């Protein structure tokens, strides 16, 4: 039987079934152990040392105890702590992005995804470079600066060369004041050599959802195609790291397996990356299964309600404080609003999950990957967030300044967010307001920016940010960054 070893590069050793089961048992036994729960919460609290705020995070065992605990006052404390950590490390900035679906050709048999190879009902489509250009112009015209590329797995239709060409096309398009400055990539597990090529193409984060960490279920849920290989899929982030990509994004598809199992697996994966490569995941996504073409989410009997979903988000925030968290438009406005307060640091807006969807007047459904709950425009989402006191940020500075992997982590840890990410958020929001916003959003946004500028501690940085913001509003000068 495989032995648990977070440093190992073997899937069954760093995501170890026996260790997960022992963790769940330990969590169940201690879910009413108030003394232990208090000590875990205490350990996770932000500590101020000079200018720096440090958060210790939690092990998968400790975090699993919190997730198992159902004592109302303690759960309330968890939400408060998650909010406190979020504010201390990320402030009120929320990074904005949109997915771009390149192709829905797929050779896999994932039973929850409508792109599965046997689905003869769905219309198959792959964007040409000219079509990508049109999609990107439509995204730029909304105000997006950051994309997540999505594609099915198909070595014939979607080889790595196609993905690389698409990235090149996307970065090359400069329409009016628009630009896509960061392309994250969510494509199937691949080789070290291909990850190196993606790195060279200038991608931001490589995102790959594990779907489920439960091997037996994984094999049943992915009955055919290359994705059936659990070990190859689970070890993908290691190969990405070996290929030089040090910003990787984890996630599970909640609803496929028991959420407590997935939660422990997710944190063990994060611990593994830290142990083996010295840097944890850049982001964690929390998708839930949605209705789609031939997919009925009710056939998956591990669905989680909104309350459990919120608790998972809060516990992830507490356990891995330096890892960004992403929520998509799979979720409704109400669910997203709650999630923003307790841990989420990136959200998508105005997403279309169909291939070529952004150039269509009406939302197309024939090539869609899943139903989108939050169907508001980007301006509406930005307006809503400003109203809630968040700063929608279109910043892409970090990886362009070489602040990836542990360099990004040390920026977070050194308390420089208010002197770096905060002004970057304000400057890129000014770009959005000047170029794309409605009058109402612009008015509210400029008021927010005026207030938020006051919060930049370093006077020199504040003066530069003010000058740049003035330049953005009065001229076509763009793309300032710290
Ligand atoms: N094809 C790539 C792969 O094999 O990992 C990833 C791209 S896929 C377009 C992005 C993600 O959408 C999947 O990893 C899966 O978690 C999610 N997804 C698939 N079907 C879904 C559904 N019915 N509802 C919600 N999310 C779904």
Image (cartoon, rainbow, N blue to C red):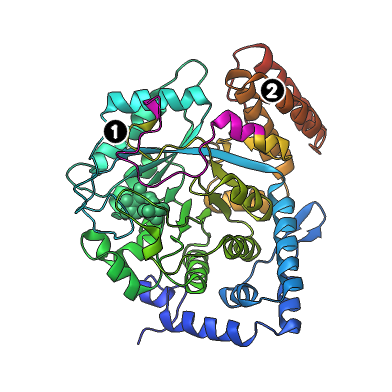
Element type at marker 1?
A: helix
Q: Which residue is mark 2?
A: 440
Residue 365 lies within the magenta run: yes
Element type at marker 2?
A: helix
Q: Which region shows up in magenta?
A: 358-383
Closer to us: 349 or 102? 349
Closer to us: 17 or 141? 141
> Which of the 4 image quarters holds residue 313?
bottom right
Looking at the image, residue 174 lies above or below residue 74: above
Q: Residue furthest top?
A: 475
Residue 475 lies within the magenta run: no
Query: From the image, which quarter does the C terminus lie in?
Result: top right
Query: From the image, which quarter does the N terminus lie in?
Result: bottom left
Looking at the image, residue 283 lies above or below residue 34: above
Count the marks: how many?
2
Q: Position of residue 100 (x, y in %)?
A: 39, 37
The answer, for residue 10, to whether it is visible in the render is: no
How crowded is the residue under tag 2: few (<14 C-alpha within 10 Å), some, or many (20+)?
few
Left or right, 207 with reference to 343 = left
How crowded is the residue under tag 1: few (<14 C-alpha within 10 Å), some, or many (20+)?
few
Q: Residue at x 51, y 25 (%)?
A: 142
Q: Which residue is mark 1?
A: 165
């Amino acid at each position: 039987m495989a032995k648990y070893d977070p440093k190992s590069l073997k899937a069954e050793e760093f995501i170890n079934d026996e260790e997960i089961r022992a963790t769940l048992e330990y969590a169940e036994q201690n879910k009413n152990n108030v003394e232990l729960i208090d000590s875990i919460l205490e350990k996770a609290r932000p500590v101020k040392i000079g200018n720096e705020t440090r958060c210790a995070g939690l092990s998968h065992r400790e975090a699993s105890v919190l997730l198992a605990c159902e004592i109302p006052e303690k759960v309330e404390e968890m939400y408060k702590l998650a909010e406190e950590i979020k504010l201390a490390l990320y402030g009120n900035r929320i990074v904005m992005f949109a997915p771009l679906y390149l192709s829905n050709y797929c050779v896999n048999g994932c039973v929850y995804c409508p792109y599965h190879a046997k689905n003869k009902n769905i219309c198959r489509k792959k964007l040409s470079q000219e079509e990508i250009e049109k999609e990107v112009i439509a995204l730029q015209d909304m105000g997006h600066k950051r994309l997540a590329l999505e594609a099915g797995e198909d070595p014939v239709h979607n080889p790595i060369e196609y993905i690389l060409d698409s990235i090149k096309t996307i970065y090359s398009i400069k329409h009016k004041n628009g630009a896509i400055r960061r392309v994250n990539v969510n494509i199937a597990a691949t080789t070290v050599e291909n990850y190196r090529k993606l790195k060279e193409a200038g991608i931001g984060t490589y995102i790959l959802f594990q779907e489920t960490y439960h091997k037996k279920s994984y094999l049943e849920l992915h009955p055919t195609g290359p994705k059936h290989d659990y070990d190859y899929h689970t070890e993908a982030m290691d190969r990405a790291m070996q290929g030089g990509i040090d910003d990787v994004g984890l996630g599970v598809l909640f609803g496929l397996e028991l959420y407590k199992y997935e939660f422990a697996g997710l944190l063990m994966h994060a611990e593994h990356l830290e142990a083996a490569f010295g840097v944890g995941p850049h982001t964690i996504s929390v998708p839930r299964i949605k209705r789609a073409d031939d997919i009925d989410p009710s056939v998956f009997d591990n669905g989680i309600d909104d309350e459990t979903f919120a608790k998972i988000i809060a516990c992830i925030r507490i356990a891995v404080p330096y890892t960004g968290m992403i929520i998509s438009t799979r979720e409704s406005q109400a669910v997203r609003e709650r999630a923003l307060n307790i841990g989420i640091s990136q959200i998508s807006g105005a997403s279309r999950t169909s291939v070529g969807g952004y150039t269509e007047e009406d939302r197309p459904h024939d090539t869609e990957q899943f139903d989108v709950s939050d169907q508001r425009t980007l301006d509406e989402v930005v307006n809503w967030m400003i109203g809630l006191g968040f700063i929608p940020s279109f910043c892409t500075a970090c990886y362009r300044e070489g602040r990836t992997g542990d360099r990004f982590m040390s920026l977070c840890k050194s308390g420089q967010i208010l002197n770096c990410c905060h002004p970057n958020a304000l400057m890129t929001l000014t770009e959005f307001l000047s170029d794309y916003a409605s009058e109402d959003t612009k008015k509210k946004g400029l008021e927010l920016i005026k207030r938020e500028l006051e919060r930049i501690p370093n006077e020199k940085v504040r003066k530069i940010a003010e000058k740049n913001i003035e330049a953005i509003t009065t001229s076509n000068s763009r793309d300032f960054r710290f």
